[in-house]
Image (cartoon, helix red, strand yellow):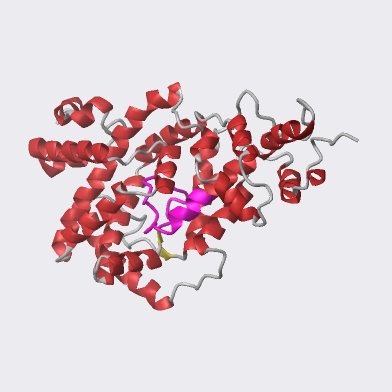
Amino acid sequence: MPQDPNDFSSSGIPFFDQIAKAMSGAGPVQWDMARQFAVMTATNSTSEANVEPTSRIAIQKLSSVADLHVRDITGLSTNDSTQPPEIDVVTRSTWVNHTLDAFKFYFSDFTGKSGSISTGSNLELESSGVDAMMANLTKMMSPAMLGMSVGSMIGQLSLRAFGQYDLPLPREPKSQLLFVARNSEEFAKDWSIKVEDMQMWLLIQELTFHAIFRISFVREAITNSVKQHVAGFQPNPNAIGQRLTNIDITDADPAAMMQKLLGDPTLLLGSERSAEQRALAPILDAMICAIICYVDHVVDQVANRILGNGAQISEAVRRRRVESSSQDQYVEQLFGIYLTDDQVERGESFISGVIERSGENGLAQLWTRSGNLPTPNEIAAPGLWIERINL
């Protein structure tokens, strides 16, 4: 009797059968699968110790000092009251859960549609035998594959993330501010930096981002642009099928087999930008450059006030930022945020150019009204920006 290409259990691949059943009727991204893979990656599938209460208390005390200086330098608020915002000191797995919840918002306009994707339960038989089975399987598994890729990337990011804004994106809830104490402690040890100094530096950075992303027009400009970028992807299920046919399906470890599929996540969404994404890129790049380099400028000022080794920490953290891992780079590409050396240099030149011409008060105009974030032409020529906003 010929094999039914929709009968995955008869193919001798029960793991695929389980996934196929789980994925029936799924949306463009399977978020439960993303969460499972992210937590598994963040914890290495082991139990994770809770954050010590003494660590929470110490970080909150440091944040009170950092908050006073950030408010003084920027003139921006970090909370609805005069009190510093509560810092939620979290484990890697808790960071993963909050991050996935926050990033799901950016996929709200993403349909996951392409010319050949189908996620319904009535799968068309394109041919007979294994080829048809694999073709139908890839159609069914696209949401799961996207979920596993996103989850794997966020899990990898949790091993390095210091807080909420390693990837400079506004999040909901607006009042939340996360801090991963373990990662800051490990980084400080690797660079022979005093842990308290490292945490103070990072808190200054996080609070400055937090203050900027509390501004409504800044949040809207960034979130709308990033959502448009994510919506521009068109998954390629045929590419997934090609990868599936090249892996060892007799592998006794299904998780290891899936990891091979996730080794090149651009396979799922495509390595080339769409025409819409290419048009949006310079606009988003200019805004992100201005924000990141303004934060760097504020951090340097505050660190010079209260830390003797602020320059050393800045060098270490910013080198790490531009020497990110492949997983970090893909997360950046996914959201359209490219933190390259060239991008940072352009942003730094913009900030210094504005200060040279109009001082700190001129630079603060970035945050006074909608439309004041620089355009692509202005990020390369700060004089144009100054002229447009009538400084």
Examine the rendered structure and indicate whether residue 380 appears above or below residue 31: above
Closer-to-camera residue (391/101) = 101
Closer-to-camera residue (33/218) = 33
Q: Quadrant of the C terminus?
A: top left
Q: Residue at x 21, y 51 (%)?
A: 298
Q: Position of residue 206 (x, y in %)?
A: 32, 55
Q: Residue at x 53, y 63 (%)?
A: 44
Q: Position of residue 177 (x, y in %)?
A: 40, 57
Examine the rendered structure and indicate whether residue 319 appears above or below residue 55: above
Q: Quadrant of the N terminus?
A: top right
Judged left or right of residue 274, residue 371 is left
- Residue 163 in the magenta stretch? The answer is yes
In this rendering, the count of numbered labels is 0
Residue 382 occupies quadrant: top left
Q: Hey, which residue is sitting farthest right in the picture?
A: 1
Judged left or right of residue 102, residue 368 is left
Q: Hey, which residue is sitting farthest left in the picture?
A: 356
- Magenta stretch: helix, strand or loop mostly: loop
Examine the rendered structure and indicate whether residue 254 appears above or below residue 140: below
Q: Position of residue 143 (x, y in %)?
A: 63, 40
Examine the rendered structure and indicate whether residue 20 appears above or below residue 305: above
Q: Position of residue 68 (x, y in %)?
A: 24, 61
- Residue 288 in the magenta stretch? The answer is no
Q: Which residues are magenta?
A: 152-177
Q: Residue at x 68, y 34 (%)?
A: 139
Residue 366 visible at all? no
Residue 73 visible at all? yes
Q: Residue at x 15, y 42 (%)?
A: 361
